[in-house]
Amino acid sequence: MHYTVSQQWPDGTTIQRVSQVAQPVHHLCDLPGIELDTFYLHRPDIGLKEKVMPWLTEFDDGTPADRDSIDNNKFIVGEDGEMHWEGSIAPSGGPYHYIDMPIDVTVTGVWAFDFATGEKTFEPNLSSAVVTVDGTPTTLPVTYTPSTTHRGYFRIHNPAGFPAGKKVKIKVPFTTHVGLNGVREAIIRSEFYVSKNPVANPLSPTSPGRVGTDVANVRARVVSPNWSLNAPTSPIVFTTRAPKTGVMIGEVGQAIENFVRESRLSSYMRFITIELPPGYTIDDSLVLYKGYLVTSYSLKMNNSSSGSGTRTVKWDLDAIYQKSPIAPVASGKWKLPEENWNLRFQGTLRVDPTAPPDSKTLRS
């Protein structure tokens, strides 16, 4: 409520609004059944704090990102997340034995988003759900009944009844799934009500027995890495027996949607495998390049390359990266790649004097 005061002088002059006072006013409503205090998503895993640079923002400073500054509603495919409801049982009108949370997924844009068991975009893990009443975890089970891949309802049954006037917190973990190279986004709409007996049609707002009308929405987004592989497109031709140095064997990259104020570690290249035709060898030292910068690493082969017969040779890249601790990075090590990375590898090919002069294929 807002008050203003005007001042009137003896000569009849009035000075308008010489002072003002604001007073807060609270309108207390008796909400029936249950009040939904909050509905939100939580991502247990967080990345590293983004270190802003003048020309690039995809470096981190080695410390965890600020939970309050990141987008907790955005997930990488395969990640675990949590849905949270918090509400207050009405002080009168009970006892109520059921809490229902109908879910309706509205897809935004053109990306399909589904919600159910069986590796849908969000797959709830009901066996790990937790219901807390008045600060104490209970053994009350949470069930989910789908109507379609976009609609369904969670239900909690308490045979003893939910205590009047107490807080109820519900946590339902889930796992994200999405096709390769995909993005999924949706608005998840949740109702929240109680009933004394099981409601026959929980998805209908007019179904008899529902007590409580609160509704909340959260946005959810699931992203998947997009991998690229480039190999030599033209034959590598030997016109003499001299070795060929600096041969580009292949190039692998990953691209994924960036995260706000957060650097995420999602995947890194573990092995390089090359199949050599008979009569050809490759030196055991392979040179790796990060991105398109002049940053190289000389890597030794795990098994020797022979000139007789078809050979599959392999390099293990695991030792290159420093996985623990994340920072600071020790000399001779590379930090784990973040959302977007590119790796090129070059080597020296040799032909054996006994190799036939026909064309051969190098596979990587």
Image: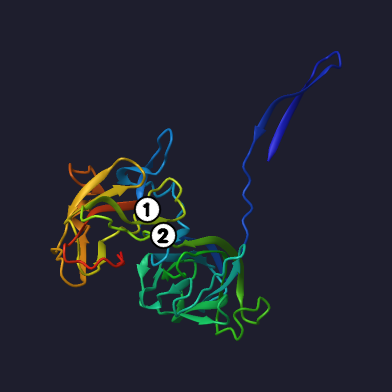
Separation of marks 2 and 1 at Cα, in angstroms: 19 Å
| Total labels drawn | 2
Q: Secondary structure at mark 1?
A: loop
* Residue 88: image tag: none
Q: Are marks 2 and 1 in contact (CB under 8 Å)?
A: no
Q: Residue at image x 39%, y 53%?
A: 339
Residue 125 picture quarter:
bottom left
Pointer 2 residue: 228
- Please name the amino acid that badge 1 sits on: Arg
In x, y percent, where is residue 38? 51, 60
The colouring scheme, among rainbow, by chain, secondary structure or one colour, is: rainbow
Query: N-terminal of the two: label 2 or label 1?
Result: 2
| Percent coordinates x, y for residue 290 in the rendering | 31, 47
State the SS at label 2. Answer: strand
State the quadrant of the N terminus: top right
* Residue 198 on image: x %, y %: 55, 85
Question: Label 1: which residue?
Answer: 264
Answer yes or no: is residue 247 visible.
Answer: yes
Is residue 95 visible to the viewer in this orientation of the structure?
no
